[in-house]
Amino acid sequence: MNKHNSKIFIIDDDEEVRQSLSLLLKSEGYQTESFPSTAILLETKNHNSTGCILLDVFLGGKTGLELQSEIETKFENLPIIFISGQGNIPMSVEAMKKGAVSFLQKPIDDKELLKAIEEALTRSDELIKKQNEIEKFKSLVNSLTAR
């Protein structure tokens, strides 16, 4: 997996958090794109290459947990890493049960974040490979002639 081909989407309503995470990740060779809300992310086109989403739990309005399944439906190859300054154990357990890669507390430890991102990108890569295999299978099935 090539860091330069991986994009990390950062969704947090705190501009300073978005900027500091973006600076850290860019210094590690990642491409980043930041959004103040999930609504703006959901308006973007589907991203078909390796990446992941750093999602703040509390954004005002709906929580990241409430939007998790909607985000995963549109961006099925982008695993979610939750970040929160106000998280708790039940919230973390719920996020992980729903498929989140990790649940990190603010202030975020850089090494922990980078480890979670590597795990998320590995998962993203596997999901893309699986999707490509499914598409290849569908193409083969569609090319069969009826007897």
Image: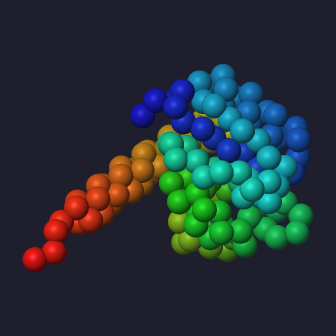
Whole-percent x, y for residue 105 in the image: 72, 52
Name the foreground residue: 84 vs 129: 129
Return the residue found at the far left: 147
User: Is residue 8 positioned above or below 42 on the image?
Assistant: above
Return the residue found at the far bottom: 147
User: Is residue 36 positioned above or below 96 on the image?
Assistant: above
Quarter containing the C terminus? bottom left
Identified at 30% across, 63% down, the residue is: 138
Identified at 53% across, 65% down, the residue is: 99
Specify whether residue 108 is in view: no
Q: How is the image coloured?
A: rainbow
Identified at 80% across, 40% down, the residue is: 18
User: Is residue 110 positioned above or below 138 on the image?
Assistant: above
Quarter containing the N terminus? top left
Whole-percent x, y for residue 43 in the image: 75, 56
To which quarter of the image does residue 64 belong? bottom right
Whole-percent x, y for residue 133 in the image: 30, 55
Identified at 88% across, 69% down, the residue is: 61
